[in-house]
Amino acid sequence: MNPILQKASWMESGDIRPYVFVRPENSIANPGARHQLDWFIHEPIYKNPLSLDELPFAEHIYDIEGKAFGPSNMAMPRWVFYDCSVVPGFVAGFACRTSKLPAAFRAILPERPGCEWTPLSLFIIIPSMHKGEWVAHNLCTINSLVKDKSDQLYGLGFLSKAFGLWYANVEQCTGFTQWGSPALKLHSHFGYLEVVGAYAPVHSHAETITYRANISTACWEKFFTREEDMAFLENYEPTEIMIDPREQKSMIDLQRKIERHEGPFYLNASEIAGKDLSEKLTIYRPKKIF
């Protein structure tokens, strides 16, 4: 296993493996061919969402997603998962052999006899009309439901998204999260994060960032090593613009700048990783080449 993943020893045995939950028609041609990576050593488990036999597997996904996002009133209705995710898009994550489920996970998930594999995470991406772009719709894991951190699987959320992007040969990923959310620390490490929307009143939660990243596995290791991304600093410079996760006006001001085509604007993953969620974030722009 790659030394970067030493803390994620749960990936080694084969009792926890990646899964792919897509229609046969949506199977990825030459999976993993775009990004050179040696992180995922086990063959994925393949599931067909149109098969009646896979309903118990899907029910486990609903359990995790509902418990993770229910408290924020963002749980995904079943029809949204079917109509907007698993039929048109790509669903992946990690699953554990049910017979090997840790006690902490069994306490959270209902028992479903005959289910050989139990999903532990969920990552959904949907192809966009913009060639090469995918939209990240949902990411959640059982880690968020486990009270004792010692029972969590190290890096499960990051590795679930990494597997999906790697397997599906994603070139560019657009996604959404809320300012001040811990998810921003994760999403900012898959490629340099461009802010394409700083405020989204069309969304249920207006204080949402819409981001876009050209996927680069060179950024992925830094999520685990916490090393400063010197390549980012060589190519991007800080502006005087700051985003305050507690102040809506700063988001609207940046949104207006984006609409006036004053960007592009970026966030620094290393800065996000080193700050508290409530702290102000510096907005960056590409350095001018003279």
Image: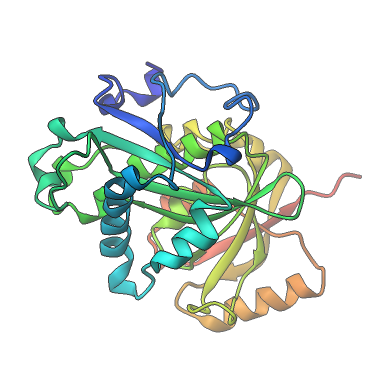
At 48% from the left and 19% from the top, the residue drawn is 38
Percent coordinates x, y for residue 19 in the rendering = 39, 35
Is 220 displayed left or right of 30 in the figure?
left
Percent coordinates x, y for residue 94 in the rendering = 34, 37
**Viewer-closest of 124 and 203:** 124
Percent coordinates x, y for residue 254 in the rendering = 67, 73
- The figure's colour scheme reads rainbow
Q: How many marks?
A: 0
As drawn, 60 above or below 171: below
At 18% from the left and 38% from the top, the residue drawn is 114
**Viewer-closest of 200 and 136:** 136
**Viewer-closest of 170 and 193:** 170
Q: Which residue lies most toward the front here?
A: 52
**Viewer-closest of 199 and 132:** 132
Is 252 displayed left or right of 186 in the figure?
right
Percent coordinates x, y for residue 210 in the rendering = 60, 64
Q: Which image quarter holds the N terminus?
A: top left
Q: Which residue lies most toward the right here?
A: 290
At 42% from the left and 56% from the top, the residue drawn is 183
At 47% from the left and 66% from the top, the residue drawn is 80
As drawn, 76 above or below 100: below
Q: Which image quarter holds the C terminus?
A: top right
Is 60 displayed left or right of 44 in the figure?
left
Q: Which residue lies most toward the top here?
A: 1
Residue 33 quadrant: top right
